[in-house]
Image (cartoon, rainbow, N blue to C red):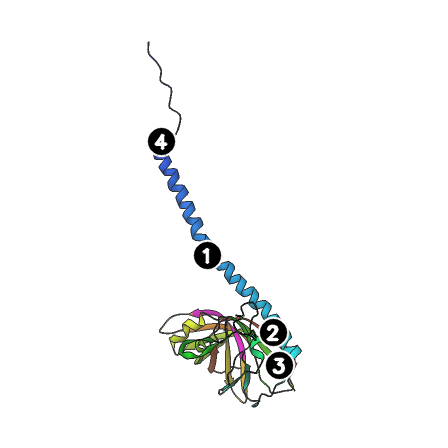
Amino acid sequence: MRVKKQPQLGISLLEVLAAIFVVSIGLLGVLAVIPFGAYQVSKANHAEYAANMLTNAAEEILIREMAKLPTGDSTKFVWFEPYEINDPDNHIARFSEDGWQEIMRGQDDLEYTTYDNKRPDFEGKNGIKSSGKYTWFFTFLPAADEVAVDVLACYNRMLDDDRQVSCSFAASAGGGTFTLFDASHLEVLTQTKYVFVTWETSEVNGAWCKIVFVDKNQSDPKIIVTGELYDAPQDVQVYIPSGVLYHKRLENVAIN
């Protein structure tokens, strides 16, 4: 009598190994996404806090009448910083004021290490003081009784990372392209979103511009920006503050 064998039910070892391989690929994909997601969340938190701080900064300037302090030369852009500095330049005069250090710094990352609850200045490269993590500053040209004030919010700005460079400018619709003469400034340009452009014709002019693209070609570095550069000549000065995230303009602010 011949007995008919029933087929064995189940899976083979080869099939098990194939399933493990497929699941492993999926898990590796998930693990790769987690750090990127955490980075994006952290980046979004920085941006949200800086944006909120910028709104508060605009209110502080108007309520405290911060733009009414004596500014000296009316032919230079006034650049008020959140730390002690007095650094006049060809087109810019940087100032600070006692008591502004706390006002112009984000409150959530203050380090309460002293009895007066002031954050200690951070030491940067070459012993130059930095402004901490979240900060803001503002600029304007005191050429009239009422001016437009530009307010900038920053994260991890370091004074010694700021740059001032001479550039060749080519205008285009709504902005233009700057050709840098020194590729060493490219690193700072990738860490900020705005630059300040100044030029002089019959009078000093300037505008804050948003960086759209940075060409990292070492032999011919360029940046493309948007901004009000309609009257800018071919040769301009570009100031590059590190860590700038947001810009806001206040119109018709009284300075007298």
Residue on which disc 1 sits: 36
Q: Is residue 131 above or below residue 11?
A: below
Q: Tag 3 or tag 2, which sits nearer the N-term?
A: 2
Around disc 3, counting alpha carbons within 10 Å, would you say few (fewer than 14), some (14 to 19), or many (20 or more)? some
Check residue 212 for magenta coloring: yes
Could you say whether the residue bearing mark 1 is in a helix, strand or loop? helix
Q: Can residue 230 be seen in this view?
A: no
In the image, which disc is placed on residue 66? 3
**Mark 2 and mark 3: span between their CA atoms?**
10 Å
Residue type at mark 2?
Ala
Residue type, mark 1 in image: Phe
Of residue 154 and residue 123, the one placed in the foreground of this image is 123
The residue tagged with tag 2: helix, strand or loop?
helix
Q: What stretch is highlighted in magenta?
A: 207-214
Residue for point 39% across, 28% down: 10
Q: Earlier in the sequence, mark 3 or mark 4?
A: 4
Is residue 5 found inside the magenta-colored segment of the image?
A: no
Measure how far apart labels 3 and 1 are at the Cα level: 41 Å
- Circle 4: residue type: Ser
Type of amino acid under label 3: Met
